Amino acid sequence: MQFKHTYKHFVMVKLIIIICVGLSSACALTKLTRGGYEEAQHQVLIKENSIELRRYSELQMVATDMSDNQDSGFMRLFRYIDSGNNKQQKIAMTTPVFTSKRNGKTTMAFVLPADMKPIDVPEPNQNTVRRTTLPAGMYAVYRYSGRHRTSPPQIKSQLRKWIEENNLLEKGNPTEAFYDPPWMPGIFRRNELLIPVTQSEK
């Protein structure tokens, strides 16, 4: 009986150690893969659980239309920041990567560093890459995890319900934001749904 008790205790301790090591490794991985990049600057106006109301200044971005192959869109944008522009300038990677859908087309966009003024943004070498912006304004944002290319329908409905309950009005198309590389486990991934909003006159 003493042996069984000791063995069970040993197994429990081992499991706890494995879980702790796994969690610390995942946290370290998150810090290394996400924490080293500049994040698009914003001000948090309201925070309620997974939802935030943020104010963004105008963000300078480069974008490309995507086919069914998401990786090809990413690589076109990566080539741009990796000196594939008319200044042959290397530009720092930032987070998040934005995607949006309009008129049946999906667009992917990289945010350029905050210290890069519009006049300093180099022109793309490829005609499939273009300069664009995320308009300044308020955005209702829902943060979630998982390996999703678009936010699940229930997240869209929850965010839209929150917008209505807080006397806000949608003023544009939703945008998806992705913060992590493909190898990040789904449970630790940071994804967001952003909807531009304005104050209701009610």
Image (tube, rainbow, N blue to C red):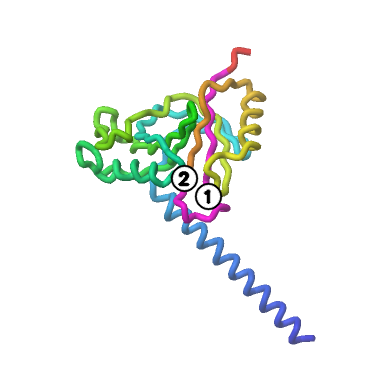
Q: Is residue 24 magenta?
A: no
Amino acid bearing label 1:
Arg
- Residue farthest along the front direction in this orientation: 68
Q: Please provide percent x and percent y for residue 21.
A: 55, 66
Residue 45 seen: no
Q: Earlier in the sequence, mark 1 or mark 2?
A: 2
Give, as a three-letter code, the residue at label 2: Tyr
Whether the magenta-drawn stretch holds residue 185 is answered as yes
Q: Residue at x 58, y 43 (%)?
A: 144
The residue where tag 2 is placed is 179
Q: On the rendered image, what quadrant is the C terminus found in?
A: top right
Q: How far across and how far down the image is residue 186, in percent?
A: 55, 52
Secondary structure type for disc 1: loop
- Observer-nearest residue: 12 or 105? 105
Q: Position of residue 37 (x, y in %)?
A: 39, 47
| Magenta span | 179-199
Question: Which quadrant is home to the N terminus?
Answer: bottom right
Residue 65 coordinates in the image, percent (x, y)? 40, 35
- Farthest-out residue, left: 87
Q: Secondary structure at mark 2?
A: loop
Which label sits on residue 180? none
Return the residue nearer the eye: 68 or 106. 68
- Callout 1 environment at 10 Å: few (<14), some (14 to 19), or many (20+)? many
Q: Is residue 170 at all visible to an observer of this figure?
A: yes
Q: Are marks 1 and 2 in contact (CB under 8 Å)?
A: yes
Q: Nearer the viewer, residue 145 or 19?
A: 145
Q: Residue at x 42, y 41 (%)?
A: 39
- Residue 189 numbered mark, or none: 1
Cα–Cα gap, marks 1 and 2: 7 Å
Q: In the image, 91: left or right of 25? A: left
Q: Is residue 71 above or below residue 103?
A: below
